[in-house]
Image: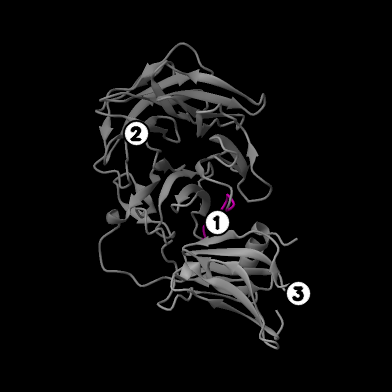
Amino acid sequence: MTSRRKFCDAFSPAWDKAQIVVQTLKSGARKVVLEGGGDARYLPTGHLVYVLSGVLFAVPFNVKRLETTGGPVGIVEGIARGGSGVAQLAFSSTGALIYIPGPVAFASLGQSFLGLVDRKGEVEPLKVPQATYAFPRISKDGKRVAYQVDDGKESSIWIYELSGATAPRRLTLAGTGANRDPIWSSDNERVAFQSDREGDLGIWWQRADGNGVAERLTKPHKGVTHIPDSWSPDRQVFSFTEETKGASSVWTYSLRDKKATVFAETPGSRLDRSVFSPDGHWVAYQLDTQPNSRIYVRPFPATATVYVAPEDVDSHHPVWSPDGKELFYVAGAGLFGSVSVTTKPSVSFGAPVRAPKSGFTTAVPSSVRTYDILPDGKHFIGVVDTGQARSGPASAPQIQVVLNWFEDVKQRAPVH
C-alpha cells in the first residue's frame, strides 16, 4: 500500500450496513469497494480484511485498480468491537494476528457455545465466540471439531483446532447456500455435509484444509432430503438418513461404486441417525416412535438380524465409545445415558446407566445430535446453552494470538 492512499470506513447508523471506501490522498477522490462491513485494513498479502457481524472477512484486492478481485471469505469468527465500532484486532508485519474474542451478531437467534464436557457433566468452554451452533463432530484423530453455524441468513460449516492454536476457520464459502450437518472422513482429510446449493438437499464433501472445491456425492429425488450420519473406519462407505413424506430410512453410500443402498427401512417409520462402530462391523441407529424411541444395532454389511438396546424412557442420537464397548444416547430433554454392549461372540447389552447431567444441550426427539465423543472416551464436545456456562466472577477479556496468519489468509482466499 503506497503513502498516497488510505483506507477508511464510512459508517451508517448500523455498523454492518457501512460502506468500505478507498480515498486517494492527492485528489481526494473516493470509491466504494464493498457494501456492508467496517474497520477495513489492507494486508501485504494483497487482501482487504474487514468485520461484519463479528466475523473477520478477507477479500482479494488489487491496489493498482482499487477493486476487489474475488469474493469474501470468513477468516476469524467472533471479533469484539469497541463502543465506536472499532474491531479489536491488530496484525504484525511478520504475519501474526492478535484479537479479542467477541460474539457473532446473531441477534435474532438463540446463543450457545461449544464446550468440552467430561462424564460428570462439567463444562469447559472452548475458545470460540457465542453463536448459534449445531452438529459438532470430532475428527477421527481428535484434533479438530467441525460444526454448523446459522446466522439467520445462511448456514455454514466451520472448523476449529482443539489446541486453540488457530482461529476458527470457515470451510464452506459464502453464497453457497445452506450447508449443514458435517461429518469427518475416517482419514481426517475431508468433511461431508448437506447442502442446498443446487436446489436439492443432497450430500457434498470437500477437503478439510479448504483447498479445492466442494463435490457432490448424492442427488436426492424431488421432495427427498439426505442427511450425512457417519463414516466407516475404512473411509469407503458413509451412512446417511433419507427423509421423505414424514418417514425416514438408513442408507449407505459406497465411494468405490458411487452408489447408495438401503441399509434399514420400515415403511411409514422413522429410522435415522446411524453411526458406525469403531471396528466397522456394526451400525447403531434409532427408531423414532411415540412415546418412546429405541436404539437398534445391526451388522454391517446388513443381514436380517437386528438387536434392540434396553428401553430407557427415550433413546435418541446413539454414539459408540471409541473402544466399541458402550453406546451413549440422549434419554430425553436434559437427560443423557449409556449402555454397555458386547458384540462377540454375539450382541448383548448391559443395564442402562443414567448420567447425573449431560452438560450440553440434549434437544429431542428428531433434532440433530448436539454432541460427539473424543478418542479418549472420557470427554465430549457439545453445544451448550449460554445459561449453562460455569458460574463465577466475570473474567477479563483474553487476547488471542494467531501465528503465521498471513499464510492462512493466502491459502483460504487465493489472489489470482
Q: Is residue 23 magenta?
A: no
> Does the magenta stretch mainly form a helix, a strand or a loop?
loop
First reached walking from the N terminus: tag 1 or tag 2 = 1
Q: Is residue 166 magenta?
A: yes
Instruction: Give the residue type at disc 1.
Output: Arg
State the residue lying farthest toward the top: 304
Say whether marks 3 and 2 touch (CB < 8 Å).
Answer: no
Considering only vertical position in the picture, is 301 above or below 313?
A: above
Name which residue lies at 27% across and 32% down: 353
Where is residue 342? Give x, y as percent: 39, 23
**Cα gap from disc 1 to disc 2, whole angstroms:** 29 Å
Front residue of 315 and 60: 60
Under tag 1, what secondary structure? strand
Where is residue 23? Give x, y as percent: 65, 81
Name which residue lies at 44% across and 67% down: 101
Q: Nearer the viewer, mark 3 or mark 2?
A: 3
Is residue 23 something that shows in the picture? Answer: yes
Residue named by callout 2: 329
| Numbered label attached to residue 169 | 1
Instruction: Give the residue type at disc 2.
Output: Tyr
Considering only vertical position in the picture, is 277 above or below 27?
A: above
Where is residue 215? Give x, y as percent: 65, 39
| Magenta segment | 165-174
Query: Badge 2: few (under 14), some or many (20 or more) residues near its Cα, within 10 Å?
Result: many
Quadrant for the C terminus, please: bottom right
Horizontal side, residue 268 vs residue 172: left or right: left
Name which residue lies at 34% across and 50% down: 384
| Numbered label attached to residue 64 | 3
Front residue of 390 and 16: 16
First reached walking from the N terminus: tag 3 or tag 2 = 3
